[in-house]
Amino acid sequence: MYGTAMSKKEKTARTVTRALLAVVAFILIGATGAFAQTTVNLQLITGNSALSGYSGPYANITISIVGGDADFTITTDSNATNQYYLGDSGTFGFVSTAAGTIGSVVENGTFDSADDGTGGNIDGFGTFNYQITNSDGTGDSLSSLTFVFTPTSGSFTNVSDFLGTNADLNSLAGHVFVCAAGQTQSECAASEALVTGFASNAPEPASMLLFGTGLLAMGGLLCRRKSGCSSSQHL
């Protein structure tokens, strides 16, 4: 309860602050809402520091619900100066909120193993509980990968039935090999990749945090200018 009735300016300031908080919450949960479809197209777009100077997208991912399972199709990307491949440890990982198994793996590299449910950290982008790993080295990198993710029980009706985000706000990640434009996998293997690094589908968490903090700061400024509200004012 308030000791005294709020003025019109105080009510306006409170409304503005709540609206800004709602915007921040919307940004943080928006990705999950976008997954509520039978087919979702995503990209590995944000690279870690090792990929500095080599812009994404690095790979394109389509996830489709077919017969209650999730079909993944991953193809690597290229630009005028570079060709990208995926490979080695943490070749590709995703976050699932539902238990399941990876099967029917088809790729043009050398498949090693699939991690069903344990996973691990993909450098700089948090933990992904489902991962595919290729044999070691550039020579085993891939430009295309398909697999089926089958739920342990029941069936999927939308991508949002399983695809989630980790603590760093990422859903997908991969181990990227950067090669010269036009280099095939075998050519890149012979000369080795220019660099290797990791990439995810989401903006950097630091950027998200900075944006949200900026919104809250703007709300505080409006509050002070419009109503002279104090830190004791209830939200």
Image (spheres, rainbow, N blue to C red):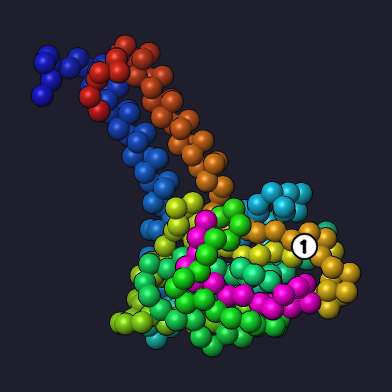
- What is the crowding at mark 1: few (fewer than 14 residues within 10 Å), some, or many (at least 20)? many
Q: Percent position (x, y) of residue 25?
A: 36, 44
Q: Secondary structure at mark 1?
A: strand
Residue 54 in the image: above or below residue 4: below
Magenta-colored stretch includes residue 132: yes
Q: Is residue 223 visible?
A: yes
Residues 113 and 61: in front is 113
* Residue 36 located left or right of residue 51: left
Magenta-colored stretch includes residue 219: no
* Residue 30 located left or right of residue 171: left
Residue 89, image quadrant: bottom right
Q: Is residue 41 visible?
A: no
* Residue 119 located left or right of residue 22: right
Residue with the mark numbered 1: 178
* Residue 180 located left or right of residue 10: right
Q: Residue at x 79, y 77 (%)?
A: 139
Q: Residue at x 61, y 68 (%)?
A: 90
Residue 6 in the image: above or below residue 41: above
Residue 230 in the image: above or below residue 101: above
Q: Percent position (x, y) of residue 55?
A: 72, 53
Q: Residue at x 46, y 71 (%)?
A: 118
Q: Residue at x 70, y 58 (%)?
A: 197
Residues 75 and 116: in front is 116
Please identify the quadrant where the N terminus is shown: top left
Q: Which residues are magenta?
A: 126-144
Which residue is situated farthest in the right direction here? 191
- Of the residues shown, which amino acid type is indicated by label 1? Val
Q: Percent position (x, y) of residue 235?
A: 25, 28
